[in-house]
Image (tube, rainbow, N blue to C red):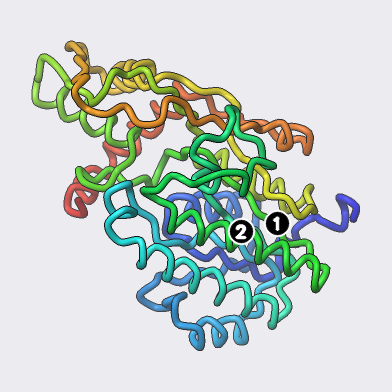
Amino acid sequence: MSDAALALDIDAPFYVAGHRGLVGGAIWRALEGRGHSNLLGLPSSELDLKERDDVFDFFATHRPTYVVLAAAKVGGILANSTYPVDFLSDNLRIQTNVMDAALLHGTERLLFLGSSCIYPKFAAQPIREDSLLTGHLEPTNDAYAIAKIAGILQVQAVRRQYGKPWISAMPTNLYGPGDNFSTTGSHVLPALIRRYDEARASGAESVTNWGTGKPRREFLHVDDMAAACLYLMEHYDGPEQVNVGTGRDATIREIAQLVAEAVGFEGQTSWDTSKPDGTPQKLLDVTKLHEIGWDARIGLREGIASTVEWYRENVDSLREAG
C-alpha cells in the first residue's frame, strides 16, 4: 500500500476511544491541529465501552472510517496487583467490543494502543518488539498486560482474516498535559512535579524521594506520542506492534534534578534508600520506528518545563480530583 493510499482523509469520521485520557486527549488535539473536521468522542458516562450493545449502536450510527483505541482501565502497581480481575475483564471487554464493532461497521483503519508492560519482566534491554511472549510477565500487572497482548493478537487476527490495515503501537512511559498528578495514583514524573512544586511553594528546605535514584527510565511527551500514532497510521501497515519512545533514558536522580530546576526549587534532595528502586532499567528499542521514518522531537527538559506550566494552570482542579 502506497503512502498516498494511507493518507488520512481529514473529512472522514474519526473516533478516538478514550479522548479524555492522557493519550486520547493528545491525539484529539493533534487531529484538530491537522484540520480534521469530523471527530467523534464520548465520555464513559455517555458511552460505556464495556457495554457491547451500546458500542455496536454507536458504530452503527456513526460508522467511523478511522479509530484510535486509547480507552483502557489503567492504574498504578497497587491497583493492578489488588484488582487483577477488573483490569483483565474490563480491558478485554473494551477492546473486543470496539474492535468487533469496528470490523462489522467498516472501519478502514484502527490503531490499538498497548503498553510496554506487555514485554517479559527480564527482557533484554533495550526491549525489541520480537521479545513479546518470550518470557514471564511482571506479576504485579500481568492481568493488564495479558489484556493488552490479547488486543495486539486481535489486531493481527483481523489483518489475517480480513486483510484490514489495522496496527498496534506500544508506548514507553508517557507524560504531559492531562497526566494524573494525584497524590495516590500518579506515576513517577507527575509525582515528582507535584512534590517539588509543593516544596517550592511551602518554602521547604528539602525533598525526599524513594530509593537510590539510580534506576533508568525512558519518557516520551504525550504530544510526541500523538504525532507518532498519526504518522504510523499513514506510513505503517504491518502485523507486528511498533515500539514508540525516544530510545534514550535517564536516571530517576537526573529526572528529579530537571524537575527541581523546572519548578524553581532550590533546596536539597535526599534519597530514602530503605524504599524500593523497582526495575533497574526499562528502555524500548525504537529502531523499527526510526526505520519507518519517525523520531521524537520534544526534549525531556523542554517537555518537563511545559508540563510544569500546565500543572500550575490546572492545579486547583487536579487537587480536587486527588
The structure residue drawn at horizontal position 44% and vertical position 21%, both measured from the top left corner, is: 301
The amino acid on which the numbered mark 1 sits, given as a three-letter code, is Ile
Where residue 294 sits: x, y (%)? Answer: 71, 35
User: What is the distance, in whole Å, between disc 1 and disc 2 at their CAs?
Assistant: 6 Å
Q: Which mark is residue 269?
A: none
- Asked whether the residues under the numbered discs 1 and 2 touch, taking CB atoms below 8 Å apart as contact, a structural biologist would say yes
Mark 1 crowdedness (10 Å alpha carbons): few <14, some 14-19, many ≥20: many
Q: Is residue 75 above or below residue 62?
A: above
Query: Which picture quadrant has residue 200?
Result: top left
Q: Is residue 158 above or below residue 262?
A: below
Compared across the picture, whether 177 is left or right of 233 comes to left
Outermost residue to the front: 135
The structure residue drawn at horizontal position 34% and vertical position 53%, both measured from the top left corner, is: 75
Which residue occupies the foreground of this view, 204 or 96? 96
Outermost residue to the right: 2
Which residue occupies the foreground of this view, 305 or 79? 79
The structure residue drawn at horizontal position 9% and vertical position 25%, both measured from the top left corner, is: 202
Q: Quadrant of the N terminus?
A: bottom right
The structure residue drawn at horizontal position 58% and vertical position 63%, both measured from the top left corner, is: 150
The amino acid on which the numbered mark 2 sits, given as a three-letter code, is Phe
Where residue 79 sits: x, y (%)? Answer: 29, 54
Which residue occupies the foreground of this view, 8 or 171? 171
Residue holding disc 1:
167
Q: Secondary structure at mark 2?
A: strand
Q: Secondary structure at mark 1?
A: strand
Q: Is residue 30 above or below residue 279?
A: below
Q: Is residue 261 above or below residue 137?
A: above
Q: Earlier in the sequence, mark 1 or mark 2?
A: 2
Compared across the picture, whether 317 is left or right of 44 comes to left
Residue holding disc 2:
112
